[in-house]
Image (cartoon, rainbow, N blue to C red):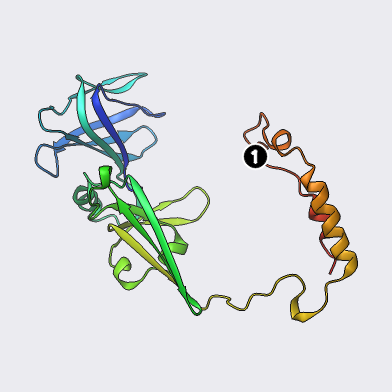
Amino acid sequence: MGFVTGRYDQLTPIISSTFEFVEIEAFPGPHGGAQKWRLGLSDGRMWLLYVFPVAGSESPEFTYSPGEGLVGSGEFTGVIQIAKADAEGQKFGLEEITDLAAGVYPATVEMTGCVTGDVGSYKFEYKGWRDEECEGALMYALPHHIASFDDNTARGRTGLKLQSPTKGLMEAVRGCSWTMVERSLPTNVTWLVAGGREPNRQVTELIERTLVNESKSDIIGETNLNSMYFSGKVSCPWSNLHGMG
């Protein structure tokens, strides 16, 4: 997501961080009635804060309270969004891009796909709160998405980039939908032994025994553990099959 977005209903907003706020600067919002702040943290990072009150609600004033963060001046109804202001790659125009996209955020996404011959395509269509349109929504795409973008989706690339935790450098893309096309799909897939050969009886019997053993496993007891690392994982009994053909 291009923004961290929160909806508030008569709540006092508090914006907190692991790092201290060392710079808090207010600006006019990008749209009528909106407010904007540029926030600098003690780790050297910059963030942008956008506040969009609903009709009849006022934008809160924020004061900094050490140990608590930015505390709003009172109850607030509306939307608050936060975006990184120091993304990698394109530096010029970064705030202009986030200003234009602020106020829009996907709440749901619908995925559809189809395959014709050895060409497949799949589409993400974003919808806003209560199925509102998401025109110009800012979302970060992973490298494998970008590599498969069709021409129309690729036009929404902004050049703003962020590192993902595990899947490489992401790029911010504007648009209410993405379409990815995958060509040269492996349509001639064979199962069991390749090349039309008869399966080895020894291997077949080992597979059968392994399936029976696995069906007797206590999957809950083996995976529901008190560990952030091992919980959800289970040993692989069929690892004995490796090297047999």
Q: Residue at x 90, y 65 (%)?
A: 202
Furthest residue toward right: 202
Q: Is residue 147 something that shows in the picture?
A: no
Tell me residue 24's x, y (percent): 24, 31
Q: Residue at x 24, y 49 (%)?
A: 98
- Count numbered badges in the picture: 1
Q: Quadrant of residue 121?
A: bottom left
Q: Quadrant of residue 46?
A: top left
Q: Decide which of 73, 96 is in the foreground and name it.
A: 73
Tell me residue 218's x, y (percent): 75, 37
For label 1, the SS is: loop
Q: Residue at x 28, y 57 (%)?
A: 176
Q: In this picture, is 137 found above or below 64?
A: below
Horizontal side of 198 relative to 142 (left or right) equals right
- Residue named by callout 1: 232
Horizontal side of 230 relative to 119 (left or right) equals right
Tell me residue 139's x, y (percent): 34, 52
Q: Amino acid at mark 1?
A: Gly
| Quadrant of the snapshot with the C terminus | bottom right
Q: Is residue 69 something that shows in the picture?
A: yes
Q: In this picture, is 87 found above or below 192?
A: above
Q: In this picture, is 77 found above or below 85?
A: above
Q: Residue at x 49, y 56 (%)?
A: 168
Q: In this picture, is 147 found above or below 33?
A: below
